[in-house]
Image: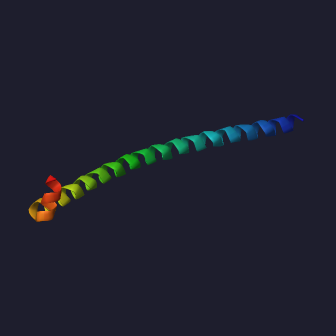
Amino acid sequence: MDALRVDVQNEKAEIVEMRKELEADYERKKAKLKANYAKKMEEFDETKDKVVQDVLEKLISKPSTNVVREFFT
């Protein structure tokens, strides 16, 4: 009976340790994903700003009568 109790306690301790490891791994992955998301959003914002700037430059450099008319009306 004592041997069974010891086995159960050992398994419980192993499970608790595994859970701690899983939680730590989860937190590491979560932090990595957050950092990656922030980096990707920053890159997206930079790309978006560049595209908008390029489009505006093209529109300004070659304004057609219709574009100018629509823009100011």
Residue at x 49%, y 47% (from the top left corner): 29
Number of marks in picture: 0
Measuring 40% from the left and 45% from the top, which residue is drawn there? 35
Q: Is residue 58 left or right of residue 28?
A: left
Residue 42 in view of the camera: yes
Give the quarter of the image for residue 5: top right
Percent of width and height locating residue 55: 19, 60
- On the image, the x and y values in percent for residue 50 come to 22, 56
* Towards the viewer: 38 or 69: 69
In the image, 2 versus 19, the foreground residue is: 19
Residue 57 visible in this rendered orientation of the protein: no
Colouring mode (rainbow / by chain / secondary structure / one colour): rainbow
**25, 49: nearer the viewer:** 49
- Residue at image x 87%, y 34%? 2
- Comparing 2 with 67, the one in front is 67
Q: Position of residue 7 (x, y in %)?
A: 80, 40
Quarter of the picture holding the N terminus: top right
Give the quarter of the image for residue 9: top right
Residue 67 drawn at (x, y percent): 16, 61
Query: As drawn, is 20 to the left or to the right of 5?
Result: left
User: Does residue 8 appear to the left or right of 37 in the view shown?
Assistant: right
Quadrant in which residue 10 is drawn: top right
> Which residue of the protein is positioned furthest toward the front in this rendering?
73
Residue extending furthest toward the right: 1
Looking at the image, which residue is at 55% across and 41% down? 24
